[in-house]
Amino acid sequence: MNGWIGRCLRINLTEGRHNIEEIDPGLLEKFIGGRGLGARIFTDEVSPQVDPLSPENKLVFSSGPLVGTGAITGASCNVITKSALTGGLACAKMRGHFGAELKFAGFDLLIVEGKAEMPVILSIMDDKVRLIPALEYWGRTTVETEELFKNNLGDPWSARETYLVSIGPAGEKLLPLANLINDRFLPVGGAGIGAVMG
């Protein structure tokens, strides 16, 4: 189907593993954009009774069919979860490079579920998916995290071509107003999405 890749990357933080899944073509046709598709997947998988800060909550990053095409807002994606602020469904638009980069890596959706024992970084480089220990980044601001991560790559070219979505101390402390930060300065949220990631 034009505009869709038809694949989902599912990360299980509890088990430290990932799966690549096919997305039902009927869902892609029925829910035209990334927000609709992501919200449908989320509500199919997460009970309304789930505590937003529990491992049963999920983060769904969902890109639509125009993402990665050069169309206006063609790099944006949506983040869907249960809000740590309101307890309702949160659908936040994420500007920046992440949506297009997810598509270029071969995925329409990224689903993050479970809870890691220790802080981790999810690294997606084309078809290479890894969970990297992240204790050295814990307690830092999002700007400090991005600078340190890119410096640790040791390759200026790789650093320029690396895009991060991160949380800072507010997300780590599970504060209900915590945001995700994308591409260094772009906030995602207003619904406590950063606390869910924390």
Image (spheres, helix red, strand yellow):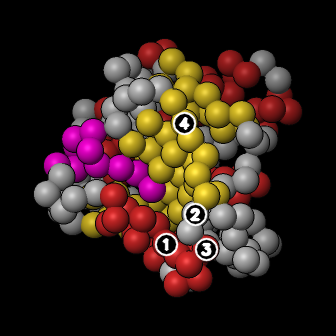
Q: Quote the CA–CA distance across marks 3 and 4.
A: 21 Å
**Residue 103: image location, x then y, percent:** 70, 58
C-alpha distance separating marks 2 and 3: 6 Å
| Residue 63 screen position, x and y as percent | 59, 65
Residue occupied by mark 3: 25
| Nearest to N terminus: mark 2 or mark 4 | 4
- Pick out the residue farthest to the left: 49
**In the figure, is residue 75 to the left or right of 155?**
left
User: From the viewer's perspective, is residue 20 above or below residue 41?
Assistant: above
Residue segment shown in magenta: 51-60
N-terminal-most mark, 1 or 2: 2
In contact (CB < 8 Å): disc 2 and disc 3: yes
Asked if labels 2 and 1 touch by Cβ distance under 8 angstroms, the answer is: yes
Q: Which residue is mark 2?
A: 23
Image quadrant for the N terminus?
A: bottom right
At mark 2, the secondary structure is: loop
Q: Which residue is mark 1?
A: 37
